[in-house]
Image (cartoon, coloured by chain):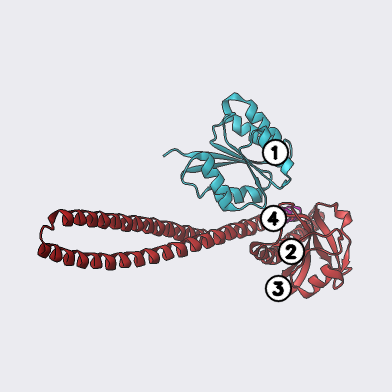
Chain colours: A cyan, B red
Amino acid sequence: MTKHRILIVEDSPTMRQLLAFALKRLKDVEIVEAQDGMDGLRKVTSDDFDLALIDINMPVMDGLKLVSLIRGEDSIADMPIVVVTTEGASEDRERALALGANEYLTKPIQANKVLSVAKSLLKVG
Amino acid sequence: MSKERGGVFGRGEEFLKLFSRGAEFTKEILAENERLRSRLTRVETAQTSAAQDPNDWEKLREELIGRIETLEVERDGVLERLREVEGENQHFAERYVEIEEENNALANLYVASFQLHSTLDLPEVLKIILEIVINLIGAEVFAVYVVDEKTNRLEAVASEGQPLGAFPAVPTGSGVIGTCVASGDTWCGDARGSDDLNTPIACIPLRIEDQSIGAISIYSLLQQKERFTPLDHELFTLLAGHAATAIFSSRLYAHSERKLSTIQGFIDLLTK
């Protein structure tokens, strides 16, 4: 069975742990964590991932910048991206989706919601 | 914790297996019903072609009536069983949802507890409390207050949504926050939000045994969060105890570090 590699880009250790906790319920999954946008960019360009969960408000480089950089890089442009954020306004959602995010989840998150979005984007049952 | 999590996942798996078995049983019942219908049709066809004289006709008719009655009894039994299985399925589906919610709650509580006790550095502990209140509860404007033992007033030591200086110091026992700290009871009001920093929508006293060492006061929730949930109340309870212990321990640790440094200085002075 193929192992799914998921990148979590989030500055809050609490959120990283909670997201990893939820995603580990998927079978054959490897979670890699990045603590800001720049760290996320380094990891996503140097390794293969099947899915990325990206926070918006982060130090060094924000999540929306990272989303647009990923979508502009041919080799990783197709990678599914889920934006996870405290920003609940509809214009924030539209902006993230326009930049290329596949899904937009607002905090506080529900572990089962994260899991179902990840399953759908990874196309696993 | 991992055993509990494993247990909950295990139970979830068991319920999923039960649903699958229920679905298979329903399919079998429907197939059996279809088979019986088909058989009845065949018998009716045979009856039409076989009944040549009145005696044969009467005999065949009685046989068929008897057979129909038997099939009707069987069908009623099957339908009754189908209703039972549907009821069981419904019950298991409801239990599955409940267990999923419990699982989510446990994951949140585990992560909050784990993070709170992951450091003895006070600024880091306060940062973790802010993260928990933002990310797990969904608060937009809030402050962490700590009792100043010299003045017996509550001073804001960390905040989100407003600068720290905007949160007024509060005498213990006075106002919503002070009363909450003095009584030791969590206070939860209207979740619509408050612009008055003396009147939070929720106040969680931070307690070690019977002593309150501070409070978390929440003034508004994130736009997408309409109200407090049962999980929030569980997180309030956890924060009341664990955040207090984490703050107390980190202050104690910092104090002992300072003392150690002073004693070491004296020893160095005496021995050199």
Nearer to us of marks 1 and 3 is: 1
Q: CA distance from mark 2 to mark 4?
A: 18 Å
Q: Chain of mark 3?
A: B
Label 4 residue SS = helix
Q: Would you name the residue on which mark 4 appears?
A: B132
Q: CA distance from mark 1 to mark 3?
A: 48 Å
Same subunit, labels 2 and 4: the answer reads yes
Q: Earlier in the sequence, mark 4 or mark 3?
A: 4
Give left or right: position of B141 versus A28.
right
Residue, disc 1: A94
Q: How dense is the environment of label 3, judged by Cα within 10 Å: few (below 14), some, or many (20 and up)?
A: few
**Quarter residue B180 falls in:** bottom right
* Coordinates of residue A59 in the picture (x, y in percent): 74, 40
Disc on res. B209: 3
Q: Amino acid at mark 2?
A: Phe
Q: Which is closer to the viewer, label 2 or label 1? A: 1
Q: CA distance from mark 3 to mark 2?
A: 12 Å
Q: Is residue A8 magenta?
A: no
* Labels 4 and 3 within one chain: yes
Q: Chain of mark 1?
A: A
The answer to whether residue B184 is visible is yes
Indicate the quadrant containing the N terminus of chain B: top left, top right, bottom left or bottom right.
Answer: bottom right
* Disc 2 packing (10 Å; few <14; some 14–19; many ≥20): some
Question: Label 1 is placed on what type of residue?
Answer: Glu
Check disc 2 and report the residue beneath it.
B248
Marks 2 and 1 sit apart, C-alpha to C-alpha, by 44 Å
Same chain? Circles 1 and 4: no
User: Does the magenta-highlighted stretch encompass residue B125?
Assistant: yes
What's the amino acid at mark 3? Glu
**Where does the magenta region start and end?**
B123-137
Residue B76, percent from left and from top: 32, 67
